[in-house]
Amino acid sequence: MRLTTIRVLVPVAVLVLSLGGCGDSDDGGSNDSGGGDPASADIPLLPDDFKGVCEGATVSRATAYDPAATSHKALYFATYEDSLLDQSSNLPTDWTVLFSADGNALQAIDVVACSVRTSEELAQTCTGYQDDGEDTGNEVRWHTATYDVSVREATTGTVLKQETIEATDDGCPSLVMFDEGETSVDQYDSVPDEKIVALLKPFVQP
């Protein structure tokens, strides 16, 4: 397999390297943790204001979850490296809403899905990444992982459904981002998006 690399500009210099010879794999009161619920109704809610819901915190300015309601909106957070990252773009577009500085669109959120990595196991150390056809010596420590996956009410943090899911793909990722000067990174298999969608569906689109 031909190996190629791409340089991209992000807040820090990043090198994207591709790998040959390995199979493809997917990565990867008020809210007082993970952002905080803005006190003023004039301040639009941000996605990160809902991050603490994954730990049982609350967002009082969100929409109260009503199982009988015909419309529900969700956000989805998953562990990335050592923190939770908004992954709502992986949900069906009609299940969520986008932040808008002109209004408070995220006030419509009533459900939050969480995929929290609880353990991991090193599957293999992946090498062979190249930059412009030259081996860089970079390596990826690829892990399988276990996740606590839950669906929660946005306003109360109450768990509506919870499962433990194993992410067991042990194949090396073919495309990897390295920070400038970085030669070794840890990466983790993640819960497939279709499993998150299936878990959320009874609460967002019953």
Image (spheres, rainbow, N blue to C red):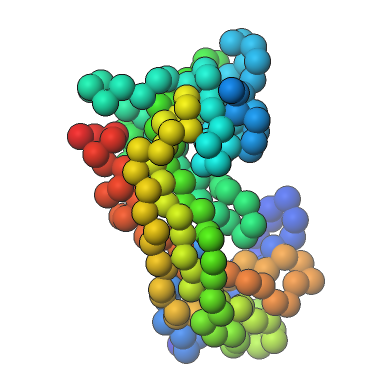
- Residue 200 vs 62, above or below: the answer is below
Closer to the camera in the image, 80 or 152: 152
| Residue at x-position 65% and y-position 81% | 139
Residue 63: x and y, percent?
Answer: 42, 20
Q: From this viewpoint, which residue is outermost toward the right?
A: 181
In x, y percent, where is residue 50? 54, 33
Tell me: 36 left or right of 100: right
48 or 101, nearer to the observer? 48
Q: What residue do we see at 41% from left, 75% from top?
A: 169
**Residue 178: x and y, percent?**
67, 68
Q: Nearer the viewer, residue 160 or 78?
A: 160
- In the displayed orientation, state which residue is furthest to the left: 206
**Looking at the figure, which quarter contains the C terminus?**
top left
Rendering quarter of residue 17: bottom right
Where does residue 132 sit, x and y in percent of width and height? 64, 80
Image point (46%, 46%), residue name? 114
For residue 36, which quarter of the picture? top right
Q: Quadrant of residue 186?
A: bottom right
Q: Is residue 79 left or right of residue 74?
A: right
Instruction: Say if 32 sits above or below 88 in the image.
Output: above
| Residue 188 visible in rendering | no
